[in-house]
């Protein structure tokens, strides 16, 4: 199958970087386009610890950080000779995965490539999993690129 439009969520994490590298490899092989997406969520700022803080300034800093992140990722994709654009999405609540799936539908994407931490059990329940949400709700194929976890390192030593 040929994937013409590859959507890649980026958040600055190591696993998102691994997902981006894999998307670049796929796009190089098929000569296609990548759209980068970064979600800035305003409701993250509404925690009890934020009382008395200038939330507008903090949000502007988050947006500027997201723009810088997208600029760096866009430059990396361009250096690989791949057509790319980037979208910063300002959200008011909701899981990032919801916004990623919406952007995939709107574009329209043929494939979503995203990094995942591969959390399991209680850590996944507490921290949530945007990648899991994307897999469960995406109308297009999803490629999850997993970072190295202590569990996989331990398994490779046992072989």
Image (tube, rainbow, N blue to C red):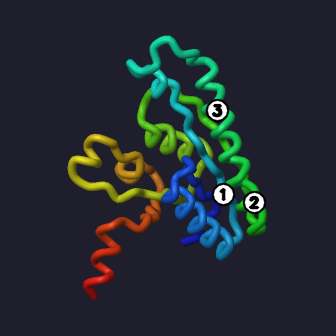
Q: Choose between 33 and 40: the one closer to the eye.
A: 40
Judge the density around disc 2: few (<14), some (14-19), many (≥20) Cα neighbours within 10 Å: some
| Quarter where residue 55 is shown | top right
Q: Which of marks 1 and 2 is nearer the N terminus?
A: 1
Q: How far apart are marks 1 and 2 (CA)?
A: 6 Å
Which is in the foreground here, disc 1 or disc 3? 3
Q: In this view, does 38 lie above or below 51?
A: below
Q: In this view, does 83 lie to the left or right of 69?
A: right
Q: Choose between 69 and 133: the one closer to the eye.
A: 69
Label annotation for residue 82: none
Q: Where is residue 57 in the image (x, y as percent from the top left)?
A: 63, 21
Please say if the residues under marks 1 and 2 sit with CB atoms less than 8 Å apart.
yes
Q: Earlier in the sequence, mark 1 or mark 3?
A: 1
Identify the residue at horizontal 55%, vertical 47% (top origin).
11
Q: Is residue 159 above or below residue 92?
A: below
Q: Quadrant of the N terminus?
A: bottom right
Q: Disc 2 marks which residue? A: 83
Q: In this view, does 51 lie above or below 24?
A: above
Judge the density around disc 3: few (<14), some (14-19), many (≥20) Cα neighbours within 10 Å: many
Question: What is the secondary structure assignment of the residue under circle 3?
Answer: helix
Identify the residue at horizontal 60%, vertical 25% (top origin).
59
Identify the residue at horizontal 75%, vertical 60% (top origin).
83
Identify the residue at horizontal 59%, vertical 49% (top origin).
108
Q: Disc 3 marks which residue? A: 63
Q: Earlier in the sequence, mark 3 or mark 2?
A: 3
Label annotation for residue 34: 1
Q: Distance between the residues labelled 1 and 3?
A: 21 Å
């Amino acid at each position: 199958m040929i994937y013409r439009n590859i959507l890649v969520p980026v958040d600055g994490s190591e696993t998102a970087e691994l997902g981006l590298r894999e998307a670049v490899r796929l796009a190089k092989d098929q000569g296609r386009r990548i759209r980068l997406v970064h979600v800035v969520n305003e409701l993250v700022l509404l925690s009890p610890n934020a009382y008395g803080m200038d939330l507008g300034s903090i949000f502007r800093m988050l947006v500027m950080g997201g723009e810088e992140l997208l600029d760096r990722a866009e430059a990396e994709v361009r250096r690989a000779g791949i057509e790319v654009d980037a979208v910063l999405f300002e959200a008011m609540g909701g899981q990032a995965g919801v916004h990623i799936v919406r952007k995939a539908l709107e574009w329209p994407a043929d494939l979503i490539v995203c990094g995942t931490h591969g959390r399991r059990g209680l850590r996944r329940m507490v921290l949530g999993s945007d990648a899991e949400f994307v897999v469960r709700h995406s109308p297009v194929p999803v490629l999850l690129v997993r970072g190295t976890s202590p569990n996989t390192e331990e398994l490779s030593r046992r072989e």
